[in-house]
Image (cartoon, grey):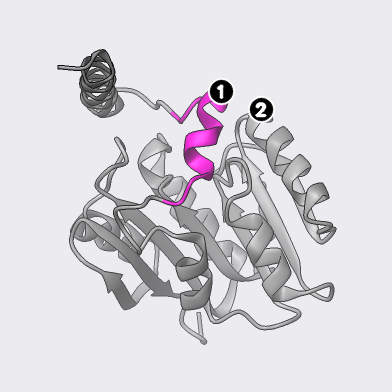
Amino acid sequence: MPMVVYILAGAALLATVGWVVWRVASHRHSLPCPAWLRWMVELDNPFTKTNRAAVIVEHLQLQPGMAVADIGCGPGRLAVPVARAVGPSGRVVAVDVQAGMLYRARAKAAMADVSNIEFVEAAVGSGALQREAFDRVLLVTVLGEIPDQAACLAEAFAALRPGGVLSVTEVIFDPHFQRQSRVARAAEAAGFRRRAVFGNRIAYTMHLGKAADA
């Protein structure tokens, strides 16, 4: 058997073991994706359509002038296309707890000549988001990394304008994967109402709304 086959098999085995260890550990501790692995976060997963940036943005039904908060924005995989979609009259607030991720997101925005993104280094749930200032709030494969999910969802609810939408995307390949039932239960406890689900049980985007009279 060619040596390259052994090398690829070994790499696959190591990646699988690492994923399992990370997934088990993430159930006990908050383990956000480290900044040095940001290149992995930037890639659209080839095995699921649901998590692709273009698909998530399409489901958001964005309009020029809208305001969007991207919680746990990472290296800007969603923030940049969302900023383009809302246009110069709109705004995006990209929030992440890791300075390294925000550094990459700023660089990506500069390369894309996008200037309507505000970058905020903060933990969500700490009051970083302005109340009733956003039409959409995004949580893309990040909810499981947040220690206090109730505080995060409460802040997201407060940050949305009445009629706004919280968009939560989860895929099974993420070590912090959250089941639909768990996401719905936690979000509804914060005051949200489930609107729509795109995808399937192991790769989905769930939209949850803030009532117009909330």
Residue placed at 43% from the left, 38% from the top?
A: 146
Check disc 1 and report its element: helix, strand or loop: helix
Look at the numbered discs 2 and 1 and tell me whether their residues touch, using CB distance below 8 Å.
yes
Q: Residue furthest left?
A: 1
Residue 86 visible within the image: yes
Q: Amino acid at mark 2?
A: Gly
Q: Quadrant of residue 48?
A: bottom left
What range is drawn magenta here? 32-44
Closer-to-camera residue (31/52): 52
N-terminal of the two: label 2 or label 1?
Answer: 1
Q: Residues within 10 Å of mark 2 (few under 14, many from 20)?
A: some
Q: Which residue is mark 2?
A: 100
Q: Quadrant of residue 18?
A: top left
152 versus 204 height, above or below:
above
Quarter occupied by the N terminus: top left
Q: Between tags 2 and 1, which lies in front?
A: 1
13 within the magenta span: no
Q: Which residue is mark 1?
A: 36
Closer-to-camera residue (3/195): 3
